[in-house]
Image: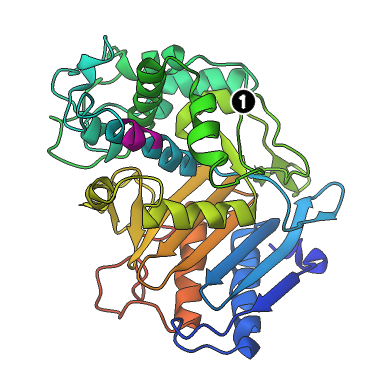
Amino acid sequence: MRLFTAYLGVALTASFPSLSLAAQELGQSPQLEAVVSAAMEEFGIPGAAVGIWTSSGHWTMAAGLADVAAKRPVKLRDHFAIRSITKSFTVTIVLQLVAGSNGAVRLDDPIAKYLQGVPNGRDITLRELANMTSGLYNYSLDPAFQEAVGTDPTRTWMTEELLAFAFNDQSHPAINFPPGTQYEYSNTNTLLLGKLVEVLTGRRFEDELQERILTPLQLDATSFLTGTAVPPPAATGYQGLTEDGLPNPVEVSFSALGVAGAMASTLHDLGRWGRALADGSLVPADLQQQRLQAHLTAGDPRSPVYDSYGLGIGQVAGWWGHTGEGLGFEAAVFHQIDRNETFAILLNESERSDVPVTIFCRMLGVLNEAPQPDSSSVCAGGASRLNAR
C-alpha cells in the first residue's frame, strides 16, 4: 500500500557497530531502515517501531503512523498491544512458582491436581500446557466465540467463559490428540496456566505479574489490560480496509485474550523483556534449560512461525523469544543468548500473519546473520512457511 509513503516520518537512533553482528558498520543502518520501510509498504503496515540492541550499541527506528486519521507519526515511546508475547510472561511466572515451591509443584504434575473440569486433566501436565503439546482445543478458533466477539467486541469476558468454548465438544472435540504426542498451538493452554497462578498464589494474575516481573525489570511502560484501550501514547490497531480504502481500526476487549494475549508495551520495554526471557535471569538455570527444550512446530499449520517452541518461548534461526499477532497488532522479540543481542518489533496492523518474523529474517540477511538456504530454519532463503497462512 502506497498510502503511507508520504507519511513515513522515520526517526532513527544509532550506535551500532557490533562485532558479533558480522562486524557491521554504523553506515549500514540505512539498509535496516530500508528493510522495514519496504515491508511496511509490501504488507500495508501503517506504523512500526523496531530496535536492535547489542553489547556494543543499539539501533532503533520509528516509522509511519500511530494514528492514520490524525496523521500522528509513531514515536519510540508509543504503546502497542503485544498479543501472544503475553504467554511468555505467564509461563515465566509458572516456572517461578515451580522453583519456589520446594518440590510441591512440578512441571510434570497433572493440571487436575490444581484445577477441576479440564478435559483429560489427569493426563495433561503443566509442562504440556506450557509447550503446547496438551491436545486441548484452542478456544479462540471456536465459531461461537468468534461470533460472540464479532457481535460485541467490547464485551468483558471471564476466563471461565473463554474456557467453556474450548471444553464444549458439541461443535468440535475438546481434545485433539493424546497429550505429549504432538505440538499444536492453543490459547487454551495459557489460560489454564493463568488460572493455576491464581490458585497457587491466592492473588490476581496481574498482581503476580507486577511483583514478579514488571517491577524487578523496571518495565514501567508494560501493562496487563482488561478493557479496550491501550495506554497513551498509544498506537491504534488496524486490520483490513474501510470502504474508503483506509486502514480499518480495530477495537476489541483485551479480556477476550486474557493471560494468553492481553498485554501492551513499548519498544524499549519489549527489548528489555526479550533479554530477560531468553537469558533466564528470572528463573533458576535448571528450569531455564528445560524451558529451551523445544518441539518442532512445522506440523501445526495454524501455529505462529517458529523453528521450534519450548516452555512459553519460541526459537527462530538460533534466536529465542516470542511473537504476537491479531486484532490490529503484530509484535516479536528475539534474543541471541551467546552474543547478548536483542531484536524487537511492534506493528499496528494484522492483516497478514508473521510479518514481524519476515522483517526479522530479512534484517538478519542484511546483517549477514541469516541461515544458509539449505537450513531448515524459516529464515532460510525462500522459507515457504512465512506469510503462507
- Left or right of 61, for residue 169: left
**Residue at coordinates 62% horizontally, 87% vertically from top-left?**
26
Quadrant position of the N terminus in the picture: bottom right
127 or 166, which lies in front?
127
265 or 150, which lies in front?
265
Asked whether residue 19 is drawn in magenta, I would say no
Coloration of the structure image: rainbow
- Left or right of 83, for residue 40: right
Q: In the picture shown, does residue 135 fall above or below 214?
A: above
Specify whether residue 180 is in view.
yes
Single out the residue that lies furthest toward the front: 102
Q: In the picture shown, does residue 153 fall above or below 7?
A: above
**Residue at coordinates 65% horizontally, 57% vertically from top-left?**
45
Identify the image quadrant of residue 386. bottom left
Identify the image quadrant of residue 233. top right
- Left or right of 216, for residue 174: left
Identify the magenta region. 93-97
Query: x%, y% of residue 6?
Result: 82, 68
| Element under disc 1 | loop
**Total number of numbered labels?**
1
- Left or right of 191, for residue 146: right
Asked whether residue 96 is drawn in magenta, I would say yes
Query: x%, y% of residue 304?
Result: 39, 49
Mark 1 surroundings within 10 Å by alpha-carbon count, few (fewer than 14), some (14 through 19), many (20 or more): many
Specify the principal SS of the magenta part: helix
Specify whether residue 352 is in view.
no
Query: x%, y% of residue 22?
Result: 44, 86
Single out the residue that lies furthest toward the right: 70
Disc 1 marks which residue?
253
Query: x%, y% of residue 344?
Result: 54, 60
